[in-house]
Amino acid sequence: MSWVRRAIALLLLADGLMTVVWGRGFLRWQRRWMPHWYKPALDWLLRWPEPLLRLGAAFEAVVGWKMWKDEQR
């Protein structure tokens, strides 16, 4: 099961970092490729103010990093 936690950790870390760096542009790009059932979540995030969006993404990246480090023990 640890490979699942590592995969989730890497996805959280990558998604958070890309959103911190590219902001709304990354979410708009992601929206083009995601299935229709996921698009409402991205639409909701696109309505967030940019600083709050990047702060939330930074928190997501930190959670992913912490999960990754915990799995390495």
Image (spheres, rainbow, N blue to C red):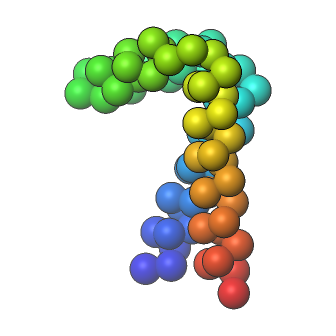
Locate residue 25 relative to residue 1 in the image: left or right. Answer: right
- Residue 24 position within the rendered picture, expressed as x and y whole percent measured from the top left: 60, 15
Locate residue 33 relative to residue 69 in the image: left or right. Answer: left
- Residue 61 visible somewhere in the drawing: yes
Instruction: Decide which of 9, 32 is in the foreground and name it.
Output: 9
Q: Which residue appears at 66% of the width and 33% of the height?
A: 55
Locate residue 17 relative to residue 44 in the image: left or right. Answer: right
Against 64, is 51 above or below? Answer: above
Residue farthest along the right direction in this orientation: 21
Query: Which of the 4 image quadrants contains residue 58?
Result: top right
- Residue 13 position within the rendered picture, expressed as x and y whole percent measured from the top left: 65, 49
Q: Which residue appears at 68% of the width and 53% of the height?
A: 62
Question: Number of callouts in the render?
Answer: 0
Instruction: Decide which of 66, 35 is in the foreground and name it.
Output: 66
Instruction: Decide which of 68, 29 is in the foreground and name it.
Output: 68
- Residue 29 visible somewhere in the drawing: no
Residue farthest along the bottom direction in this orientation: 73
Quarter holding the N terminus is: bottom left
Residue farthest along the left direction in this orientation: 37
Against 38, is 17 above or below? Answer: below
Against 25, is 65 above or below? Answer: below
- Residue 69 position within the rendered picture, expressed as x and y whole percent measured from the top left: 70, 72
- Residue 48 position within the rendered picture, expressed as x and y whole percent measured from the top left: 50, 17
Quarter holding the C terminus is: bottom right
